[in-house]
Amino acid sequence: MRINKNWRCAFIGILTGAVLSACSGSDEQTETEESESATTSSAVEAVDSAEMASSETSNEEETAVVQPENPEPLTYEGDLELPVNGATGYASVRMDLKATADAGSETLAALKAGTAFEVLEEVGDWWYVQTATEYGWVQHLYCFINLPDVIPSIIYDNTNTYASKFVSSGKAIPGITGEALYDGKAYNMRLGKVSDIVPVLYSMSKKIHLAQQAALAEGNSLVIYEGYRPFSAQKLTVDSLTNLAATDPEVMAGINTYPWDTNWFIATNVSNHQMGYAIDVTLAKITEQQEIIIGDYAAIAITGYTEYTMPTTIHELSMASATFTGPVKSSSPTAWLQATLADTMNEAAILLQRYCTDAGLIPLASEWWHFNDLDARFSTEGNSSKGEYLLDSTRSEAPEAAE
C-alpha cells in the first residue's frame, strides 16, 4: 500500500509540474508540455498497472489465507479436574460480598444463604464472583461448589431429586420411596446439558477429586448419589420413617436395636448433608469413556459403567448397611481405624472405602456409602449451614484459560 501511495505522489507531482508549465504560454513550453503529457500518461499507466498487480496479489493472498484450526484443548493441572472459574458456587451461610479480597474492605451486599453465583477468579482464600445482580469477593471457606462443574468424570445420580431409593429393612417408606424429595437438576451451560446439582464445601471437593483419581487409575469411578440435602427433605424422611417404625416391628428393630438408634441412619436434626461436608457414594466399573471438551480444557466423561454389588442397596436405612460392627464416634478422624468391619462389608465396599479414606475422607459407621470431611466440618464450625434453602439453579459457564 505504501508503494501505491508513493506512485500516486509522483504522479501528482508530475501532473502539477505539467499544469504550471502550461501556464507560461511559450512554444517551447508547449512542446515541453506535450512531452511531459506523454510522460504523465506513461506514469498513469504505470500506476494503474502497479495497482492492478497489487490488487491481484492481495486478492490471491486473501483467497489463500487458511483459517487456524481450533487449538488443542488444555489439560488442567490443579486440585480439581477443571478450574473453578466459570463454576457455580453457593453461599452456604449468610455472607458479606466485599469490594476487595479483604475481610476489612467495604461490604457491597449481604448474600443470603443459598445464593448462587459464578466464580470468576480465585485469589488465595477468596473468590471473585458474579451473582444475578452484583460482583464482589467472598471467602470460599464458607462456599459450596457444584461438583459436576469441576469433577465431570464422576458419575452423578441424585435419585432423591426424581425417585428416592430410601427404604428401611427392605420396605418402602410411605411418601418417600420412589418420590422426588426436592428439585436438584438444572440446565448447566458449562456442561451443555441438564445435570445434577451436587454441592459440597469447596475444601471437600479437593478430597473427592483425589478419591476419583485413585478410582480412575484402576478403571473405576465414584458414583455420587447426593451431596447437599435440604433440611426439608431430611425432616420429611425422618418423620415418615418414624411413623413407619411405630407400626412395623421389623423396621423398628432395624433402626433401634442396640447399639444402634434411628439417628445413625437418618439424622433427626441438622445433618452433615445440610452442612455440606458429606457425600453418599458408591462405586462403578468403567466400561466406556470418552474425551470431552469443556471450554478451553479436555475432560473425561464416563459413558458406560456397571455399579458394583454392595452390602445393600444404597439408602437402605437399617443396621444391614452398617460399615462397622458398632457405632464409631463420627467426630473423630481416627476412631474408625480401630473399628471392626461388619461381616457384610464386601470387596467392593472395602475398595470404595480405601479410595475415600486415602483421600482424607472419614467413613460413617452406620452407612457403607456415607463419607465425611471432618476438616471441612471443623473449619466451618460455629458458622455452618442449616440447610434451610433449596439449590435448584446454576450460573455455570465454560472455563477459559488465563491469557
Image (tube, helix red, strand yellow):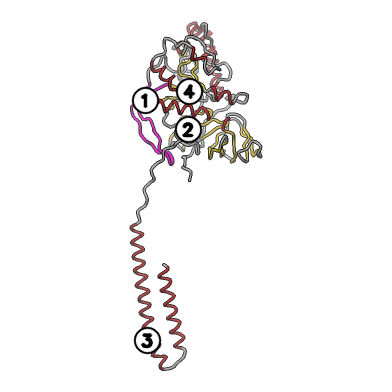
Question: Within 10 angstroms of label 2, few (less than 14), some, or many (20 or more) residues?
Answer: some
The part of the chain drawn in magenta is 282-307
- Where is mark 2, residue-wise? 79
Residue 35 numbered tag: 3
Q: Residues within 10 Å of mark 4 (few under 14, many from 20)?
A: many
Q: Amino acid at mark 3?
A: Ser
Crowding near the residue tagged with mark 3, few <14, some 14–19, many ≥20 C-alpha atoms within 10 Å: few
Residue marked by disc 1: 218
Q: Nearer the viewer, mark 2 or mark 4?
A: 2
Q: Residues within 10 Å of mark 1 (few under 14, many from 20)?
A: few
Vertical side of 42 occupied by 326: above or below: above
Q: Is residue 290 magenta?
A: yes
Say which amino acid is labelled 4: Asn
Q: Is residue 136 left or right of residue 369?
A: right
Q: Quarter holding the N terminus?
A: bottom left
Q: Main secondary structure of the magenta part?
A: strand
Check residue 81 in the rendering and tell me which mark sits there, or answer none: none
Q: Give SS at disc 1.
A: loop
Q: Is residue 234 above or below residue 288?
A: above
Mark closest to the chain's N terminus, 1 or 2: 2
Q: Which residue is mark 4?
A: 160
How far is mark 1 from mark 3, CA to CA?
Answer: 91 Å
Q: Secondary structure at mark 4?
A: helix
> What residue appears at the point 42 percent right and 74 percent down from the top-left corner?
8
First in residue order: circle 1 vs circle 3: 3
Q: Position of residue 60 (x, y in %)?
A: 33, 61
